Amino acid sequence: MMKKYFQFDELGTNYRREIIGGLTTFLSMAYILFVNPITLSLQAVPDLPDAMRMDQGAVFVATAIAAAIGSLIMGVIGKYPISLAPGMGLNAFFAFTVVLTYGIPWQTALSGVLVSGIIFILLTLTGLRETIINAIPAELKHAVGAGIGLFITFIGFQNAGIIVNNDATLVGLGDFSNGATLLAIFGVIITVILMIRGVKAAIFYGMLLTAIVGMIFGLIDIPKQIVGAVPSIEPTFGQAFINFDQIFTLQMLVVILTFLFVDFFDTAGTLVAVANQAGLMKDNKLPRAGRALFADATATTIGSILGTSTTTAYVESSSGVAAGARSGFAAVVTAILFLLALFLSPLLGVITPSVTAPALIVVGILMVSSLKSIDWNRLEIAVPAFFTIIMMPLSYSIATGIACGFVFYPITMLLKGKRKDIHPIMYFLFVVFILYFIFIA
């Protein structure tokens, strides 16, 4: 019955391949269980009021459950070997831009994630997603991905102490005699070595080896236990409803649009890439695309209620496909493993910024690969793409980077005489982001 539902025979797969694929995908993205709580709690930022920090244990549980629910829906309804979890880049935007820079309470930020998830569900059910996807030029979509990659890499360098504040030049190299910084550098080197050698789950193993080395040299406290009770989710559960009335501002509109935009296209890109790798594309189209996007939207909505940032499809699922996964059963396996991981919370103590920084840096390397898809010889495209990319790390804001690119795009296209190539939605976004700069930025 299970084999028939997941179409094992048509896809040329079996239980062994799907289980191995699901396990490989889990190991490849398991780092998010530890990176997400540290990111959303702003652990790397000293001297913050406790009210600005989310509870790490609660976020850990929310991350695992959101990943399990998203992966389960994707596997059972979407029938793709693609797993979901709170997204990198989006969690950085949530913590460092919305909460830290804008000063918006994290409860209100969760409300923004909830609204973006509901909008995403409506867009999926009404079929408007194709219209929106087609309205925004592909080059700007790639620019957003690359910009987020540079942004989270910059955050990784900061968390590691590799890049620090310099009053004369704004930024400079940190103290390389510092043990925590040296540990992070070791983590980057060992993770890169593993990736170049083609090791599956290189990021996860890199974090593991970095933590072990840190404990050996006394830079990280050795945990008293590995398996423990599941932390309470009470500190974050339902907080998205607490300040829900505060989302009706222009600033929160920009935040919600950013959550929606990045998740929308990140998921679409991941679905196409992984499905193509698995040979699941038909006539250059993605079968059951609506169901797959529905899984993402539902997981985002539920995740926000549990207490985590936007949940999205993970490109690390490609590692599971490479290991043989072809059906949604692999995503179900990954979902089960995320639930089992709930009992590993004692390990949170050994996952310090020095351990997570290499993961941020390496994920950034993977994300900027989208630069190759931008036609840099066409200035009308290159200019908005460049400003989108460069302004994210320089302004410390994903939203500002998107705003810059989307303001420049209609201008450069009009100057080039390509008025007919600009979709009306792009004019609407132009006005929205002009207002963003006037009233917010």
Image (cartoon, rainbow, N blue to C red):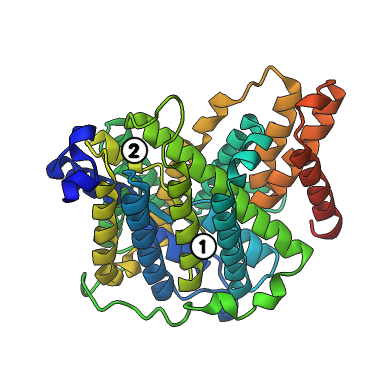
Q: Are marks 1 and 2 in contact (CB under 8 Å)?
A: no
Question: Quarter holding the C terminus?
Answer: bottom right
> Is there any visible trace of residue 95 in the rendered image?
no
Q: Place residue 317 in its image quadrant.
A: top left
Q: Secondary structure at mark 2?
A: helix
Label annotation for residue 138: none
Label annotation for residue 318: 2
The Cα–Cα distance between marks 1 and 2, rounded to whole angstroms, is 23 Å
> What's the residue type where badge 1 is placed?
Ser
Residue displayed at 23% across by 53% down: 333
The residue carrying pointer 2 sits among few (fewer than 14), some (14 to 19) or many (20 or more) residues within 10 Å by Cα, namely many
- Give the answer, above or below, for where 59 lies relative to 129: below
Across and down, in percent, residue 421 comes to 76, 26
Q: Nearer the viewer, residue 348 or 296?
A: 296
Q: Secondary structure at mark 1?
A: loop
Label annotation for residue 309: 1
> Taking 229 as reference, is 307 left or right?
right
> What's the residue type where badge 2 is placed?
Ser
Across and down, in percent, residue 54 comes to 51, 74
Across and down, in percent, residue 288 comes to 42, 42
- Give the answer, above or below, for where 384 lies relative to 186: above
The residue carrying pointer 1 sits among few (fewer than 14), some (14 to 19) or many (20 or more) residues within 10 Å by Cα, namely many
First along the sequence among labels 1 and 2: 1
Across and down, in percent, residue 267 comes to 49, 45
Q: How many marks?
A: 2
Residue displayed at 29% across by 67% down: 347
> Taking 70 as reference, is 199 left or right?
left
Residue displayed at 64% across by 40% down: 131
